[in-house]
Amino acid sequence: MFFFVPYPCALIPYTLEGYIMVKKYDEEGAMSEDSKLEVQPCECCAYKNKPRSSENKEALIKRINRAQGQLNGIKQMIEDDRYCKDILIQLSAVEKAVSAVSREILSEHMKTCVVDDIQKGNTEIIDEVLQLVTKYM
């Protein structure tokens, strides 16, 4: 059993950002024999990284910028009291643009991250993928 320090990792001296110091305790709450501090990932701010090629990043950012531009246009349409049908058509276009970005990232995730984890023997990634697919359906 571990006792987690109740502070964000950034406030704990001598720890890397994304990690916290923890002490081991047994089932009854007593300090275990090897009661030294251990460094564990901090769930509040630790995250995984996915290196992307510069071309891939640029393509995704362009798509996101385009969707942001469309949203700004919709905002202006609302401020200008434009006809509801016209606004709804533009909203539909933005939804499709954002969905396309999601599909692209999910596809990349399946082809790289998921394949890598399965090859390393981490089958827990399958549950993560199922949650993602369920969320987007």
Image (tube, rainbow, N blue to C red):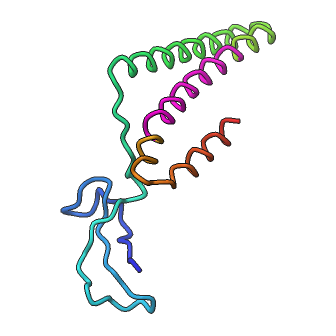
Q: Quadrant of residue 8?
A: bottom left
Q: Which residues are magenta?
A: 92-113
Q: Is residue 105 magenta?
A: yes
- Depth check: 131 or 62 in front? 131
User: At 50% across and 16% down in the image, what residue appears?
Assistant: 63
Q: Position of residue 35 (x, y in %)?
A: 26, 84
In-image side of 39 versus 114 (left or right): left
Q: Quadrant of residue 94?
A: top right
Q: Position of residue 86 (x, y in %)?
A: 76, 7
Q: Position of residue 26 (x, y in %)?
A: 39, 88
Q: Is residue 48 magenta?
A: no
Q: Does residue 8 lie above or below 93 as drawn? A: below
- Depth check: 35 or 75 in front? 35
Q: Does residue 114 lie above or below 73 as drawn? A: below
Direction left: furthest residue:
14
For the N terminus, the image quarter is bottom left
